[in-house]
Amino acid sequence: GNAVLNQYEFDKDTVMKSTLRIKDFGVETSEEWARFVRNNRNRKFTKIADPECNFDHKYDVVIGPVADDDMALLFRQYENGVITFESMLSGMLYKKTTNQYSFHTVRAIRLLRKVDI
């Protein structure tokens, strides 16, 4: 089929001033961010109520660094026992990251506006 691109925008101030439950990791990688990403990528993680898990969508919006392919490699190495958690964290400190807003609930998605392109 044909590729389709949908583009959306949102007002950051509106999101931040809303009553949405927001988990904001800031723009830098951190141990807390790494645990959150690890837990949410691991389908075997069972502590759903844990604040470092969003399988239950306890957070409407999650803000933080993008776990790109370089980060994914570090996570895989850790999960396969090649490196320790501390080594994974150390490796992340030297990775340049961009930030993302991830919308997880209908309440959050309602703040998105489709852009005509």
Image: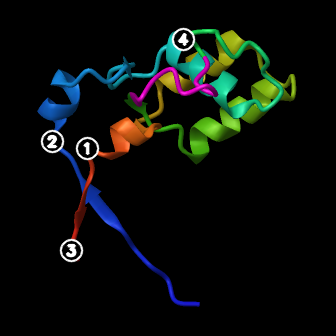
> Residue under circle 2?
11
Q: Magenta residues?
A: 53-62
Tell me where residue 89 appears, x and y as whole percent: 59, 17
Q: Amino acid at mark 2?
A: Asp
**Secondary structure at numbered mark 3:** loop
Q: Which of the marked residues, 2 or 4, is nearer the chain's N terminus?
A: 2
Q: CA distance from mark 2 to mark 4?
A: 28 Å
Q: Is residue 99 visible?
A: no
Judge depth for marks 1 and 3 and give the one in front: 1
Disc 3, disc 4: CB below 8 Å?
no
> Residue under circle 1?
111
Q: CA distance from mark 2 to mark 3?
A: 17 Å
Q: Which of the marked residues, 3 or 4, is nearer the chain's N terminus?
A: 4
Give the residue drawn at x 18%, y 35%.
Answer: 12
Crowding near pointer 1: few (<14 within 10 Å), some, many (20+)? Answer: some
> Residue under circle 3?
116
Disc 2, disc 1: CB below 8 Å?
yes
Give the residue drawn at x 78%, y 31%.
Answer: 77
| Direction from residue 2 to residue 76 in the image, left or right | right
Q: Amino acid at mark 1?
A: Leu
> Residue under circle 4?
31
